[in-house]
Amino acid sequence: MKLPIFITALWAFFSACTQPPASEIATVSYDVKGKEVKIYTTADSSALRLTPTGTKSFQAAKQPLETEVAIFVNPAKTFQSFMGIGGAVTDATADVFASLPPEKQQAFLKAYFDQAEGIGYSLIRTTIHSCDFSPESYTYVADEDKALGTFDIEHDKKNRIPLIMKIIETAGGRIPLYVSPWSPPAFMKDNKDMLHGGKLLPEFYPSWAQYYAKFIKAYEALEIPIWGLTVQNEPMATQKWESCIYTAEEERDFLKNHLGPTLKKEGLGEKKIIVWDHNRDLINHRAE
């Protein structure tokens, strides 16, 4: 089995020549004396995979030459915390995993999710019904069932849920899982198609919000905790596979007026909700 290669990128930050105002200069007491840096190496055509390869001690240094690699760290400046790295458990993932012999399944689980002997993935994501990595399009309800009386996750119990349970066990009994839909059922959309974009019809906003709650409760009834959810995978992408379009205002209003209140009413108000599950380079445009 071929393991993915992870590349650690080092970013050099350069400050402008102008002196910032005194009010913006923070004083932090931090001493590197006696401290060491651990070095981990991943290299192609080798057995090195996040392998400890040495240590270095901090030493006094002069102004670096332009030919020297330098990393400047300001302990007073912090950004968002890093939650973790993980993988998606799609129908394709689960079906392929189920086709492997037991020893290969165990090797896969250990390589990706074992904290001590693997790379220790710390997040997983799965889909609310089908996505572009499913053998076919499907939902959890019968067609035109606006009341969701036929809601049933039986489909997922064949391969996907067993894999998620094994992942949780391998990860030590706990791993954050978040969920995302690629499209509402076709009858809820203006194009009557789970594929090719289209929009969620306003008359189905309450039903679709309830759909998320039913999914979360169904999984948690099987002792699969859900950390959070995203409103929509790639909400501005019209794809030939499952997809659905939301403008920033539509996503905002659906969350504010339907999804958020529904989750709270159903006792799921603590779930994390993520908007703009799409490319990061357009996040500022979305926020505007």
Image (spheres, rainbow, N blue to C red):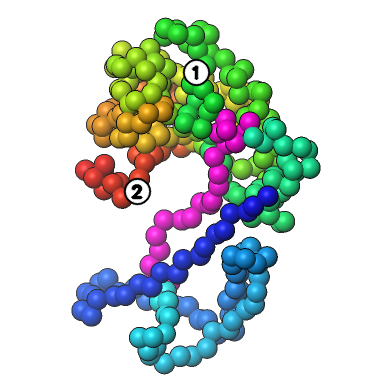
Magenta stretch, residue numbers: 75-95
Name the quadrant containing residue 91.
Answer: top right
Viewer can see residue 22: no
Residue at image location 60% in from the left, 73% down from the top? 39
Residue to which mark 1 is pinned? 139
Q: Earlier in the sequence, mark 2 or mark 1?
A: 1
Name the element at disc 1.
loop
- Name the kind of residue labelled 2 in the image: Arg
**Residue 85 counted in the magenta span:** yes
- Seen from the viewer's position, the closer of residues 76 and 47 is 47
Residue 197, percent from left and from top: 33, 26
Residue at image location 36% in from the left, 41% down from the top? 278
Q: In the current view of this chain or complex, which residue is farthest to the bottom?
A: 62
- Seen from the viewer's position, the closer of residues 248 and 279 is 279
Residue at image location 39% in from the left, 16% down from the top? 186
Name the quadrant containing residue 174.
Answer: top right
Residue 99, percent from left and from top: 70, 33
- Seen from the viewer's position, the closer of residues 275 and 65 is 65
- Name the kind of residue labelled 1 in the image: Thr
Residue to which mark 2 is pinned? 280
Name the quadrant containing residue 263.
Answer: top left
Q: CA distance from mark 2 to mark 1?
A: 29 Å
Rendered view: 161 above or below 58: above
